[in-house]
Image (cartoon, rainbow, N blue to C red):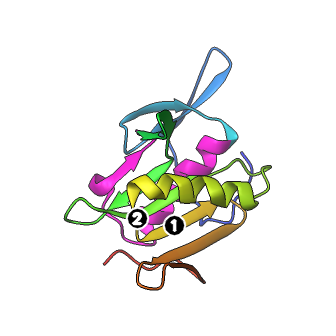
Amino acid sequence: MLKLSFPNYEFRLKKNDEKRFIFDEIRKKYIELTPEEWVRQNCIKFLINEKKYNSQLISIEKKITINKMVKRFDIIAHDNLGKADLLVECKAPNVIINQKTFDQIITYNKVIKSKYLMVTNGIIHYYCMIDKVEKKIRFLKEIPNYR
């Protein structure tokens, strides 16, 4: 797979009927290895290994309802109280991150109410903090380590 701008991680891979699969440590099963899944799995390793998020507090691709429409978020990392701490939107490396991508994560966050947001295509990462007092989104140089 394509080299991403995350540290190099080891993954369990397998091939079945010409399709490639990657083992997802959070969901405890093999998932078809698409370009977006490659980014998601690298991001999960980054959050656990570099940012010290507890793997047991991470949720992957769960359904949420927004305006009566069912959507799926990519990654949520929760705090010890179960509240969303970080919401991540992953795109395939060939997808350009644009305003539409930010609109998507902001719409999801109206329901999820996470303090931090991350948008990544594996090559470029954007980090934001939701300032509820000033009702602004502040861009950050990096996402803080788990507190």
Residue depicted at 23% across the width and 59% down the height: 82
x then y, percent, for residue 42: 56, 55
Residue for badge 1: 117
Q: Are marks 1 and 2 in contact (CB under 8 Å)?
A: yes
Q: Is residue 134 above or below residue 33?
A: below
Left or right position of 85 against 110 = left
Left or right: 92 in relation to 54? right
Q: Please rate how many residues cluster around mark 2, counting C-alpha atoms within 10 Å: few if below 14, some from 14 to 19, many from 20.
A: many
Q: Which mark is residue 114?
A: 2
In which quadrant of the rendered image does the N terminus lie? top right
Q: Is residue 61 left or right of residue 84?
A: right
Cα distance between the residues tagged 1 and 2: 7 Å
Element assignment for label 2: loop
Going 61% across and 62% down the picture, which residue do you hit? Answer: 119
Give, as a three-letter code, the residue at label 1. Answer: Leu
- In the drawing, does residue 83 fall left or right of residue 21? left
Q: Which mark is residue 39?
A: none
The part of the chain drawn in magenta is 36-63
Q: Nearer the viewer, residue 137 or 120?
A: 137
Q: Can residue 137 be spotted in the picture?
A: yes
Between residue 47 and residue 10, name the one nearer to us.
47
User: For the residue carrying disc 1, how many other residues have a C-alpha within 10 Å: few (<14), some (14-19), or many (20+)?
Assistant: many
Queried whether the magenta region covers residue 129, the answer comes back as: no
Residue 137's place in the image compared with 27, above or below, is: below
Q: Is residue 3 above or below residue 27?
A: below
